[in-house]
Image: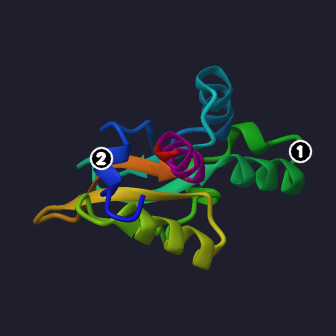
Amino acid sequence: MKDRTVLQAKRLGIVSCQRQDALGGIAQRMADDDISALVVVNPADDLAGIISRSDLLRAYMEDPEGWRALPVEAYMTRDVVTVAPTDRLLDAAKLMLGNHIHRVVVVRESDAGMIPIAVISDSDLVCDMADAG
């Protein structure tokens, strides 16, 4: 893990949603695809935030009757911790531990903003550690 980059340990691709998507549909996608978070993008596919299972739980606890209809933007995290494709896995691990988070978004910078291309989770890091022996 020390010298490997984030993209050497992760396939490209993300599961994303839009700010205006309803939380009920997002919860269903997470359950169906067995994923713990979706990257939130704007119409130009720039990074806008991230919505996690914990965010959905918070929405439910705050509004048990109406949470399903609420938009993603009401509960998403806007300040997303990101890494570049060439950053090392070790640096991603330090960011996760230092920020008490379970994932970082790999982004490619563009003229318009940051384009998310992958998500590295603590599960990815543990798998990489196990594979390294």
Q: Secondary structure at mark 2?
A: helix
**Which stretch did the figure color magenta?**
122-131
Residue 44 at what x, y percent from top left? 23, 49
The amino acid beneath tag 1 is Pro
Q: Main secondary structure of the magenta part?
A: helix
Q: Which residue is mark 2?
A: 8
Distance of label 1 from label 2 (alpha carbons): 41 Å
Image quarter hosting the N terminus = bottom left
Residue at 66% over, 71% down: 100
Q: Nearer the viewer, mark 1 or mark 2?
A: 2
Disc on the earlier residue, 1 or 2: 2
Q: Secondary structure at mark 1?
A: loop
Q: Is residue 129 magenta?
A: yes
* Res 102 seen here: yes
Q: Which mark is residue 64?
A: 1
Q: Residue most toward the bottom?
A: 98
Q: Nearer the viewer, residue 124 or 107?
A: 124
Q: Nearer the viewer, residue 69 or 100?
A: 100
Residue at 67% over, 46% down: 70
